[in-house]
Amino acid sequence: MNEVLTVAEVAAFLRVNRSTVYKLIRRGELPAFRVGSDWRFNRSQIEELFKVRTPDTEDR
């Protein structure tokens, strides 16, 4: 099962303020869903979105 993250956890992962995470949600730049009034994120989607390709992993 995919791990679910909170706004605070995503902010820490991205090294940004929580307010920045909320801005990214409003702009549709972060895949998120609501649980009640709280925003949640699938860890795998966040990691995939911000995956950094290194020269060793790039297609040649």
Image: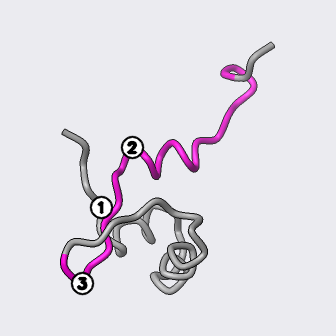
41 relative position to 56: left or right: left
Say which element carries label 1.
strand
**Disc 1 and disc 2: Cα gap in Å?**
10 Å
| Residue 13 image offset from top left, x and y in percent | 45, 61
Q: Quadrant of residue 39?
A: bottom left
Residue closer to the observer: 33 or 57: 33
Q: Earlier in the sequence, mark 3 or mark 1?
A: 1
Say which element carries label 3.
loop
- Vertical relation: 57 (above or below) 34: above
Q: Which residues are magenta?
A: 36-57
Q: Residue at x 67, y 34 (%)?
A: 53
Type of residue at label 1? Leu
Tag in front: 3 or 2: 3
The reply to whether the magenta stretch includes residue 56 is yes
| Residue 8 image offset from top left, x and y in percent | 35, 75
Residue closer to the observer: 56 or 44: 44
Q: Are marks 3 and 2 in contact (CB under 8 Å)?
A: no
| Picture disc at residue 37 | 3
Type of residue at label 2? Ser
Residue furthest top in the image? 60
| Picture disc at residue 44 | 2
Classify the position of the C terminus by image quarter: top right
Type of residue at label 3? Ser
Residue of label 1: 5
Tag in front: 3 or 1: 3
Q: Are marks 3 and 1 in contact (CB under 8 Å)?
A: no
